[in-house]
Image (cartoon, rainbow, N blue to C red):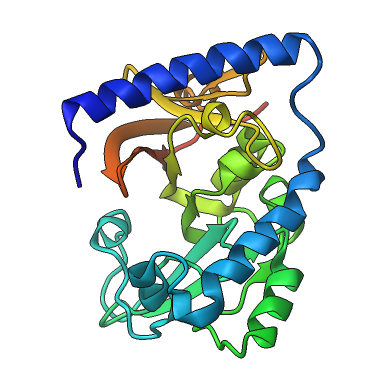
């Protein structure tokens, strides 16, 4: 799905205006807020999105996420070297009530572990709406994964449109990196510039952007993280840009090196 050139220009102009406004308001102490303040709005969004069979949301997304026979996405299969007959373990961080990850990989046993800080609330929401998902969400913060999972235990760690909603996204990525096996991948899929577009309100505290082949995380203040720099020597970063529902998407694949340097 592509946008016309004038719409792309308009989007860029709006982003610059919003960024300038946000920076001024931040300096005046009139912007931002507690991350937890955005949690009720997130629950409200999902309640509206999931009732009536997803007709208030993106119907195709709802159908795919609720389908227990929906196959694992080709772009994810390509990241894992698991032979036929093997067991594949995938961690979905910030999964929401319904994980986006496909549930079937023919010839392999697929184990999906979806975690979210609102896992308990999402389970209650699904039960209240009478929905039975293929995989139920569990409670888990991306920033605290090693407290509940062993290191080097997943074939893929995945986050879709979630870490830019977190309170410490770099820490969450570091935790995802710790729990994937050597030679495996942390896969990050996020809409770009969300912090700017949402005025850094509620859960929207961070921007994920691709700059010169690197994933850059910024908070609209002075914090700026480079994924390539943060994982230099232990991981390799690949980035690409796409468009989804008319919005820019930043995708990063963080490959964990097989032979990591020893720590003295």
Q: Is residue 249 above or below residue 57?
A: above
Q: Nearer the viewer, residue 174 or 24?
A: 24
Q: Quadrant of residue 119?
A: bottom right
Q: Quadrant of residue 201?
A: top right
Instruction: Name the residue: 60% across, 46% down.
Output: 178
Residue 63 in percent (x, y) is at 37, 77
Q: Is residue 197 above or below residue 85?
A: above
Q: Nearer the viewer, residue 219 or 236?
A: 219
Instruction: Name the residue: 46% across, 48% down.
Output: 182
Q: In this view, does 34 lie above or below 24?
A: below
Residue 112 placement, left or right of 128: left
Q: Is residue 242 above or below residue 45?
A: above
Tally the numbered discs: 0
Residue 238 in percent (x, y) is at 32, 33
Q: Quadrant of residue 32?
A: top right
Instruction: Name the residue: 31% across, 53% down.
Output: 79
Residue 226 placement, left or right of 243: right
Quarter of the picture containing the C terminus is: top right
Residue 67 in percent (x, y) is at 38, 83
Q: Is residue 102 visible?
A: no
Residue 174 placement, left or right of 82: right
Residue 251 in percent (x, y) is at 36, 39
Instruction: Name the residue: 46% across, 74% down.
Output: 54
Q: Can residue 163 be seen in this view?
A: yes
């Amino acid at each position: 799905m592509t946008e016309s050139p004038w719409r792309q220009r308009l989007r860029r102009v709006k982003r610059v205006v919003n960024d300038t406004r946000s920076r001024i308001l931040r300096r005046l102490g009139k912007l931002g807020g507690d991350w937890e303040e955005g949690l009720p709005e997130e629950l409200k969004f999902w309640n509206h999105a999931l009732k009536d069979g997803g007709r208030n949301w993106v119907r195709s997304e709802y159908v795919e996420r609720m389908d227990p026979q929906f196959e694992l996405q080709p772009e994810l299969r390509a990241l894992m070297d698991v032979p036929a007959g093997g067991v594949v373990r995938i961690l979905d961080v910030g999964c929401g009530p319904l994980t986006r990850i496909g549930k079937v990989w023919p010839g392999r046993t697929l184990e999906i572990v979806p975690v979210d800080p609102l896992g308990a609330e999402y389970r209650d929401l699904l039960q209240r709406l009478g929905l039975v998902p293929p995989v139920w969400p569990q409670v888990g913060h991306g920033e605290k994964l090693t407290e509940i999972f062993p290191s080097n235990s997943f074939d893929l760690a995945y986050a879709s449109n979630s870490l830019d909603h977190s309170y410490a996204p770099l820490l969450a990525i570091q935790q995802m990196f710790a729990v994937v096996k050597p030679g495996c991948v942390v896969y990050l899929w996020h809409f770009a510039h969300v912090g700017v577009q949402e005025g850094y309100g509620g859960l929207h505290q961070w921007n994920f952007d691709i700059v010169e082949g690197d994933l850059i995380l910024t908070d609209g203040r002075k914090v700026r993280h480079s994924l390539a720099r943060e994982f230099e020597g232990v991981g390799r970063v690949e980035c690409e840009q796409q468009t989804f529902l008319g919005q820019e998407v930043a995708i990063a694949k963080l490959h964990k090196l097989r032979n990591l340097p020893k720590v003295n």
